Amino acid sequence: MNASTPAPAPPHEAPADWARVRADFPLLQRAVHGKPLVYFDSANTAQKPAAVIEAVDDYYRRFNANVSRAVHQLGAEATEAYEGARKRLARFLNVRADELVLCSGTTFAINLVAYSWALPRLTAGDIILVSRMEHHANIVPWQLVAQRTGATIRVAEIHEDGTLDREALDRAMTPDVKLLAVAHVSNLLGTVNPVREICREARRRGIVTVVDGSQAVPHRPVDLQAIGCDFYAFTGHKVCGPTGTGALWARREHLEAMPPFLGGGEMIKEVSFDGTVFNDPPHRFEAGTPNIAGFVGLTAAIDYLDTLGMARIEARETELLTHLTEALDAEPGVRIFGRAPEKAAVVSFLVEGAHAHDLATLLDLEGVAVRSGQHCAHPLLQFYGVAATCRASLAFYNTHDEIETFIAALRKVRTLLG
Ligand SMILES: Cc1ncc(COP(=O)(O)O)c(C=O)c1O
């Protein structure tokens, strides 16, 4: 294997052999507090298959060098691998490689849109429409833009079942709305939003759309051309890739018109004290040394997922979600947040009489990792009138047996909490 050929994904002749797939994840074999680990926190970050870990290791062992600067062999190999990641991601998402800005993840990607696209354009009187179910990464950057420009934030509300109120959304798309920020999939509710229809409607009205794909790209086939948004952000560590990786996809015309966000090396063509000629997009937005090892790992992660097949992954996770939902529904006093007909494998819940943090802490002692708290979605919890929830989030590497272990642990924990 050389730098240009990423670590091959393991051959799964029978991709439905999920036990074999699970064995590809070294960390899932470990124990926690003396119990086999049940990792139900993949919406927070996904575990990594050996192919990803080995690809990062291989990069540092064999071709570590900086990109786009050195003419030597190692520099050429590192650059080829880094640019190869851009091409690989573009193919995965069905877009052009020169429309993909590689960055540290969704938070960076959305801030790039906020600072380079929105800040120079929005003025007092403009409205930024933000859905109620957004992660803080798709709320706070817009609040910062609003503070600086005098624009205001309008909230697109949801129904009790966790679906977007489409009629209210259409009504909210008035002529003064310049930008719509919406999640493809909610990290707290699992709701899959009909982003294709929403973006079509927004486009018809001249509204620019920013879709947060953090919880969609890891769990279902995503075709950005079909969605038809203006900007799409996602994060690599939720796609079984390394932390500190991700990308912003943007229509070329937006990238061409956007000034740089950060200045430094890599993003320039020519610098003198009289002025600087900036590089063309997407490199104009990639100042400084990037996370080369991370993108080598992300390439391996995408290869791995593609070998399994995103449609197959989606079907597997839907099956696990049904099992988990039915099992929790059978438990007395359990309240599930988010009952959208189309859901990703995320179940936020509360148990009557128990605090979310107490539940998560005691579940951890049983080897079960769930997240508790506000899930970076305060406005959504305010809608439901609760301070925190527990969230069990699954991935294709989880098993039906783990769901049974989780339910047994939940019953035990409830007796402890009285
Ligand atoms: C829906 C959503 N948006 C944005 C983010 C932020 O991603 P990152 O911290 O990788 O930038 C997350 C991560 O939890 C998320 O779930």
Image (spheres, rainbow, N blue to C red):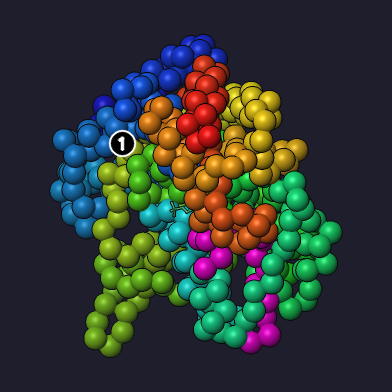
**Residue at 18% in and 44% down:** 64
Q: Is residue 238 visible?
A: no
Residue 312 is left or right of residue 340, and the answer is: left
Looking at the rendering, the stretch of residues picked out in magenta corresponds to: 124-140
> Whole-percent x and y of residue 327?
64, 25
Say above or below: 391 vs 21. Answer: below
Which residue is farthest front?
418
Q: Is residue 267 visible?
A: yes
Residue 156 is left or right of residue 136, and the answer is: right
- Tell me how many marks there are: 1
Magenta stretch: residue 126 in it?
yes
**Residue at 21% in and 52% down:** 66
Question: Is the CB of mark 1 within 8 Å of ligand 1?
Answer: no
> Whole-percent x and y of residue 204?
78, 64
> What is the secondary structure assignment of the residue under circle 1?
loop
Magenta stretch: residue 359 in it?
no
Q: Residues within 10 Å of mark 1 (few under 14, many from 20)?
A: some
Q: Nearer the viewer, residue 360 or 249?
A: 360
Quadrant placement of the N terminus: top left
**Residue at 68% in and 44% down:** 338
> Whole-percent x and y of residue 352?
62, 41
Q: Nearer the viewer, residue 26 or 216?
A: 26
> Whole-percent x and y of residue 385?
66, 57
Residue wearing tag 1? 4
The image quadrant of residue 229 is bottom right
**Residue at 32% in and 79% down:** 276
Residue type pointed to by label 1: Ser
The image quadrant of residue 130 is bottom right
